[in-house]
Amino acid sequence: MNASEALGSIWLRAGLPPEALQHARLTGEDPVLPSSFAVGAAAQSTIAAAALAACELGHRRGAGRQQVAVDMRHAALDCTGWFSLDGRVPDLWDSFSGLYRCADGWVRIHANFAHHREGALRLMKLDPAAATRADAEAAMATWRALDFEDAAAAQGLVATALRRFDEWDASPQGRAIATQPLFTIERIGDAPPLALPTLREDQRPLEGVRVLDLTRILAGPVGGRALAAYGADVMLVNSPHLPNIESIAETSRGKLSAHVDLRTEAGRATLRQLAAEAHVFVQGYRPGGIAALGFGPAELARLAPGIVCASLTAYGTQGPWAQRRGFDSLVQTAMGFNHAEGEGAGDGKPRPLPMQILDEATGYLIAFGAAAALWRQQQEGGSWHVQVSLAQTGQWLRGLGRVPGGLSIARPDLKPYLETSASGFGELAALRHGAQLSRTPAAWPRPSMPPGSHAPAWPGGPGQ
């Protein structure tokens, strides 16, 4: 399946008008980054879907349709998430993160957060204050891969055993994922169409749309950033007591950034007030986690009839891993991509995909699903629920096919695609948005700011 076919499939699955696809222009072909998988097509088709759906909603609000152009190389580089702050390129991986050889295979450990790193080291019977990477490698050599994976999961840690595709396909979770579509958009309640303001021709297609972004790493923030690029008021809601990674500087472009403590009744009351005035609510809690706090899709549909809820998980909502924590790198390892890339390279050494494409493509699917559901809300009324997962995106990526010779190419130069802006984190250099809108270019007029920089209140509301 090429990128245009992938875009068409995504578009029609969401129930959007087929004639709008004539306004998408996709250029380039794989390989664009060193991989045996069609990572360029995955990036290009999902970015194009998100931008085109935003423009179609703008058309529904009274503006003319506009052309959306996406070059595959630009899209793929956009999905690398590269950035620098004051000329420094942050190291986004903890020294203990990565693949470890075990007694019978490999395990990937995600240790970017201190509590995950310390938990993994304690599971290895090591002192987190004194252990070195060499100590961890020696300890892991004594474990069986699946035993460590199970022990880590039992303690709420994040580690997965490396599998081949056939091993993943035979696993209970692999079978569960194989039965699920790339995404779902489901009507979950009755409501009249929301009164979105009529759009002028010079306004970006999502201006006037309010989005709550309750996500941290990495797919959710990418989706919120895309919605902001198309004009939405996106408010990133962080907990004041949870850590973040440095990528927040890059993914917060265009967003408001507020602190709300959902451990307190006052914080939950604040979020209820924000949600009551929102059009979209994006969250990346494990299944059932946000509902336990009173903000599940059913509760939100009662609080704000007509709202679009978007839910992100690692492994979907079905199967024995539905409750497991997960990150892109771990899902790649569990599903067979790392093993397959090693085979494709000819040396058999497992290796990751050239970017966190499961995160990035899933993020753009969140933006696409939110815009598509809003379009349907304007047509049909109702409240809506969009569901995506990293594993479902992985299954879809695998279905795009392999790229002969893809691992032999060099990474292209980033410089032609970079832009620099002031931010609350320092001077930020990062990739321009990968979709070119012919009439209302994507942009982030709000600078990226640290969590808690803005009050938890919508622009134009009381006191604003």
Image: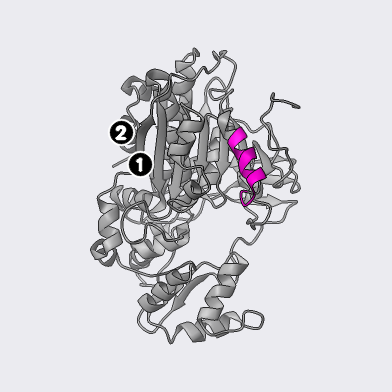
Residue 366 location (% of width, % of height): 46, 40
Q: Would you identify the image quadrant in which residue 11 lies?
A: top left
Mark 1 neighbour density, 10 Å: few (under 14) some (14–19) many (20 or more): many
In the rendered view, tell whether residue 4 sits above or below residue 311: above
Q: Would you identify the image quadrant in which residue 330 lies?
A: bottom left
Residue 259 location (% of width, % of height): 68, 45
120 part of magenta stretch: no
Q: First in sequence, mark 1 or 2: give its number.
A: 2
Q: Residue flagged by tag 1: what amino acid is it?
A: Phe
Q: How is the image coloured?
A: one colour
- Magenta stretch secondary structure, dominant: helix
> Which residue is labeled 1 in the image?
183
In the rendered view, tell whether residue 296 sits above or below residue 275: below
Query: Measuring 45% from the left and 44% from the top, which residue is drawn there?
Result: 311
In the rendered view, tell whether residue 138 sits above or below residue 30: below
> Which residue is labeled 2 in the image?
13
Q: Is residue 248 left or right of residue 154?
A: right
Query: Measuring 37% from the left and 72% from the top, which residue is drawn there?
Result: 347
**Distance CA(mark 1)–CA(mark 2):** 9 Å
What residue range appears in magenta? 262-273
- How many callouts does the rendering have? 2
